[in-house]
Image: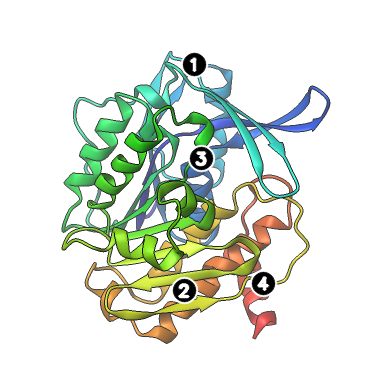
Amino acid sequence: MPDIRIAIVGESLIDFAATGGLNFAGHEGGAPTNSAIATARLGQPIGMVCQLSTDMFGERLLKHIESNGVDTRWVLRSDAPSTLAFVERTPTTNRYAFYMNGTADTQWNPTTLPVLPESCRFLQFGSISLLHEPAASRIIDLVKAQQGQRIVLFDPNVRLSLIKDLPAFRANVYRWSAYSNLMKFSDEDAAALAPGLGLAEVAASFMASDTGPRAVVITRGGDGATLFRRGKAPLEIVAPKITVADTIGAGDTFDAGLTVGLLEQGVEQVTQLDSLPDAQWLAVLRFAAQAAAINCTREGANPPTRAELQVALDAAK
């Protein structure tokens, strides 16, 4: 397996999507896992950092990750149970119920932190693993260890149903953002993190200090996405026009599109986030948005391959 270019740390779980009444259809998921698989399908060598259960769900998750070409050398195993998530679709959003107390991914607590190879130019973190100890502290330890070595992408992936103390969570997100170079979140996340502020104000609040993200991308569902940078005008793209089948995994696929798109534009150092020309940033945003759009035309988290994405990008020209 080639040396990885991107690493993702976080949970891997089983999603059960409501199909009517008390019937649910299960499939492998978890935001970081969805992003890892999307990254692999988009053609970049990717490594997953997590802990999986040895139960039957954990075995399925490991097989799913490996079969999609994700490097699993940093995946630990535990006899703790797997995390389960139940999803109910609504016309405007998805409702979630998570069962993850004492589960394998929340108990990730390696004695020695993984050492990522020099070839790895991006580390992505975020999502619900940051809500549980000891995993949360060890994830942040890993993120801190990457400072100055690679670009760190942070997607808080807010799940309000899991957050017991919202003010404390908001404070944590701002604290964690200081260890990132690039942030991405949705307009719904923005409203939860900084209620009453406009999107530009929310982005500026994360870029207010000398440390922290050089750029913030806020997705707006069917309305597109906006890039905010320090000292530069925002850049906007419109979303591709599609018939939506399912939005599960859309944001995760967008994250993968960001890191893969940036690598394809030659971005491997933090300083390049500032110097990348507008035209190339717009190409990255369209790349990510088109990948997410294709995912939304399918049931469940099912991101496109690089070849499928290229067909759609060519058709959109």
Q: Earlier in the sequence, mark 1 or mark 3?
A: 3
The reply to whether the C-beta atoms of the residues labelled 4 and 1 are less than 8 Å apart is: no
> Which is more foreground, mark 2 or mark 3?
2
How far is mark 2 from mark 3, CA to CA?
27 Å
Say which element carries label 2: helix
Residue occupying the point 42% across, 82% down: 280
Q: Earlier in the sequence, mark 4 or mark 1?
A: 1
How far is mark 1 from mark 3, CA to CA?
20 Å
Say which element carries label 1: loop
Residue occupying the point 53% across, 66% down: 288
Residue receiving disc 1:
81
Question: On the picture, is 46 further left or further right than 19?
Answer: left
Query: Is 214 situated above or below 192?
Result: below
Residue 35, given in percent of the width and then of the height, sits at 49, 50
Residue receiving disc 3:
66
Q: Earlier in the sequence, mark 2 or mark 1?
A: 1
**Label annotation for residue 284:** 2
**Label annotation for residue 240:** 4
How far is mark 3 from mark 4, CA to CA?
31 Å
- Residue toward you, 299 or 217: 217
Amino acid bearing label 2: Val
In this view of the protein, can residue 73 be seen by the observer? no
Amino acid bearing label 3: Glu
Label 1, residues with CA under 10 Å away: few <14, some 14-19, many ≥20: some
Q: Earlier in the sequence, mark 2 or mark 3?
A: 3
Say which element carries label 3: helix
- Residue toward you, 123 or 179: 179
Residue occupying the point 67% across, 62% down: 294
